[in-house]
């Protein structure tokens, strides 16, 4: 059983953020973004009261220039270990992910070892290029 004292774990190496792991039980009382505004992927919790409303809107077609790929994984079912590596492919941390946990990868590398049958919901920016964008090591 994991402790409840560290519901958000930020993995860093040499002042570079590599990953955020948010336990399923984390539930802020007010809107809280976990990532800095300059990150290419923004992850946060937006909190509304009952009968609150998000007014209808469209998103303007802004052009952005991104380098690299960040990804968000949500464990829908199962349990696994994630190994988090530096850009130099050095193992920095191993963490357990359980059902409902969220992982945001913003740098370095990663690999997974399934402890149970596991299903991820994966979210990353596109477009998908159709070429192998992964460099395995």
Image: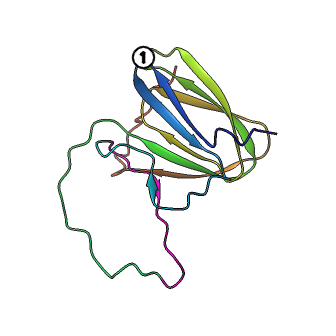
Range of residues picked out in magenta? 39-51
At horizontal 44% and vertical 51% (from top left) the residue drawn is 43
Left or right side of 130 for 49: right
Left or right: where 17 falls relative to 59: right
Would residue 49 be counted in the magenta stretch?
yes
Q: Secondary structure at mark 1?
A: loop
Rendering coords of residue 39 (x, y %): 33, 42
Residue under numbered circle 1: 14
Residue pictured at 49% horizontal, 73% vertical: 48
Q: Nearer the viewer, residue 110 or 102?
A: 102
Name the residue furthest bottom: 51
Residue 16 falls inside the magenta stretch: no
- The coloring applied to the image is rainbow
Is the residue 60 above or below the residue 113 in the image?
A: below
Image quadrant in which the N terminus is located: top right
Q: Residue at x 20, y 67 (%)?
A: 60
Q: Nearer the viewer, residue 32 or 108?
A: 32
Name which residue lies at 77% across and 46% down: 117
Q: Position of residue 51 (x, y in %)?
A: 50, 85
Please name the predominant secondary structure of the magenta segment in the image.
loop
Residue 56 rendering spot, x and y as whole percentages: 32, 82
Q: How many marks?
A: 1
How crowded pointer 1 is (Cα within 10 Å; few <14, some 14-19, many 20+) is rated as: few
Residue 64 pos. (x, y %): 20, 50
Horizontally, residue 103 falls left or right of residue 38, namely right
Q: Is residue 107 left or right of residue 26?
A: left
């Amino acid at each position: 059983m994991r402790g409840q004292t560290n519901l958000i774990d930020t993995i860093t190496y040499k002042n570079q953020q590599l990953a955020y792991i948010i336990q399923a039980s984390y539930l802020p009382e007010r809107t809280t973004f976990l990532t800095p505004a300059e990150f290419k992927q923004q992850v946060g919790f937006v909190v509304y009261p009952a009968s609150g409303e998000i007014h209808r809107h469209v998103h303007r077609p802004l052009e952005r220039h991104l380098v690299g790929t960040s990804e968000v994984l949500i464990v829908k079912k199962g349990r696994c270990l994630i190994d988090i590596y530096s850009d130099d492919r050095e193992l920095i941390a191993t963490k357990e992910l359980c059902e409902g946990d969220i992982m945001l990868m913003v740098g370095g590398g990663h690999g997974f070892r399934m402890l149970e049958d596991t299903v991820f919901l994966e979210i990353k920016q596109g477009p998908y290029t159709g070429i192998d964008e992964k460099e395995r090591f």
